[in-house]
Image (tube, helix red, strand yellow):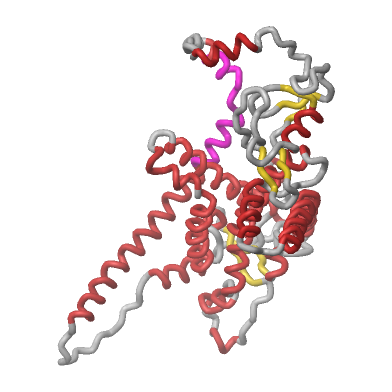
Amino acid sequence: MDFYSSLNSSQLDVKKPTIFEIASCSQLDSLITPSIRFLLAHYTHQYPRVLIRILNNFDELNLLGRGIVEYNYLKTWNSTFIEKFYGIKRCSSKPIIPSSSDFDGDSLKFNEISTLSRAQILSSLLDTVGLPYLDTKLQLYHEKLVPIYLMNQNTVNIPQEEQSNSAKDAKSRLPVKILSILCKLKTLIRNLFFKYYPIAKMSLKLISLFIYIMYLSNKTSSASIIQYLSKISYSRLTNADHQRVESIITPKKIIKFESNVPQTFTSIVLSNIKSLINPLEKIAWSTTDTILPASIFLLRFLEWYNANRNPDDDNDSLKKFTIPPAPKIAKSKFDEEFDEENKHHDSSICRICNQKLHNPGAIETGYVFCYKCIYEYLRDQSKEEGGVCPVTGRKLLGCSWSEIRNEWNVTNLRKVIL
C-alpha cells in the first residue's frame, strides 16, 4: 500500500474504487475458506463423532453456506459482505437513465435503477463462490492424476473403482466392444484434462492480470472476466444505499381500517409469526454487521502475526522438550521366524531373477525387485492367485483384475534410486 499512499488524490476517481482495494477484497476472500477449514479440523480432533462428517463434506457445505450469505448481501447491498466491509458495491455498467419526470430528483429511485439484476446477481455469485469451489475440485482431481500419470508412462489408465464398475457392466451383458470404447474415451478425456488443465488455468490468470491492468488504466470498470461479460462495474457505497437498505429492512406502517369481521385462528397465528420475524430479521442484520467485520479484522491480525513471527522462537521452545524413547513392542513368533529367514539375504539381489537389481522398484510391503521382474510377475499371475506380494503373500491394494485385458492392472510400483 506504499504506492497507494504516494498517489495524487486529485487524480483519483471518487466514485470508483482503486485496484488495491479490490485486490485486498479478493485476498481476504481467499483466506476465509482455509481459516474455516482449519478451525473445523482443529475441533474435529476433539469431537470426531460429531464433526467428522461435516469435515468430509466441507467443500459442499461451505459452498451452500457462503452461497446463502453472499446471495443475501448481493441482493440487499449489491456487494459481498467483504466488499461491503470495504465500502464497495457492484452496479450495472450501463444502467437505464430515466427522464427527470420519472424520479423528480429522488436519489433513492435513481439508485435502484443502477442495482444489479437477477442475472447479474447469479453471475456475481458464480464469480465469488462457484468458481473457487470448481477450481478446488479440479485441482484436487489433477493432483490425484499426477502419480498415475508418472507411473504409467505418460498415460492415465482407468482407476480400480472404474474397473470394478466396468466388470459389473460386463456382467450385466453389456457388449465388450462398447465397454472397451467407453473406457478408451474416458482415458482420452482424462489425458486431455491432465495435459491442458494447467495451461487453461495459467491462461485464465493471464487474462485476469490483463483485465486488472485495463482497470488500473481506466480502460474498463470491471475487475474479472465474468464481471466484464455480465457488464458489472465497481462503485462505492453511498448514503443513498444505506437509506435504501434501511427502507427495505424497516417495514412500512400500514393503516388498518377497523372492521367487524372476526379474526380467524390462522390470521392470528400469521400475525404473531410476522411480529416475531421482523425483530429477528433486524437482530440478524445487526449481528452480521458486527460479527463479520470483527472476524475480518481477526483474519487480518492473524495474517500479520504469522508473517512477522520469527521461526527461531518456535525452535527454541521445541528445544526445551525431550522426545521420549519409543516403546518396545514384543514381536510375535511369525515375525521372528520371518526376520530369521531374511536376515542373511543380500538386499542388492532381486528375489525373482536372483540377479543384481536393475532399475529397482518397490511394492507396498517395502520389498525391492527389478522393476521389469516384479511388474511382469504381478501382471501375469492368475486371477485367483495373483495380486499378492511374492515374499510375504499379502494382498496388494494397487493391483486390480481387468476383465477386458484378462490380466492384472499394476499401479502400486514405485521406482527406487539406490
Horizontally, residue 412 falls left or right of residue 62, namely right
Total marks in image? 0
| Bounds of the magenta segment | 298-317
Horizontally, residue 259 falls left or right of residue 53, namely left
Residue 307 magenta: yes
Horizontally, residue 127 falls left or right of residue 80, namely right
> Quarter of the image containing the N terminus?
top right
Give percent across and percent down for residue 41: 48, 38
Foreground of the two, 261 or 78? 261
Foreground of the two, 69 or 278? 69
> Quarter of the image containing the C terminus?
top right
Residue drawn at point x = 73 percent, y = 63 percent: 178
Residue drawn at point x = 46 percent, y = 50 percent: 292
Does residue 325 appear in the picture of this structure?
A: yes
Does residue 5 appear in the picture of this structure?
A: no
Taking 118 as reference, is 377 above or below it?
Answer: above
Foreground of the two, 306 or 65? 65
Residue 183 magenta: no
Which residue lies most toward the bottom here? 260
Horizontally, residue 83 falls left or right of residue 376, namely left
Residue drawn at point x = 64 percent, y = 35 percent: 385
Secondary structure predominantly adopted by residues drawn in magenta: helix
Taking 242 as reference, is 391 above or below it?
Answer: above
Give percent across and percent down for residue 29: 58, 50
Give percent across and percent down for residue 356: 83, 16
Residue drawn at point x = 41 percent, y = 38 percent: 48
Give percent across and percent down for residue 172: 61, 62
Taking 52 as reference, is 230 above or below it?
Answer: below
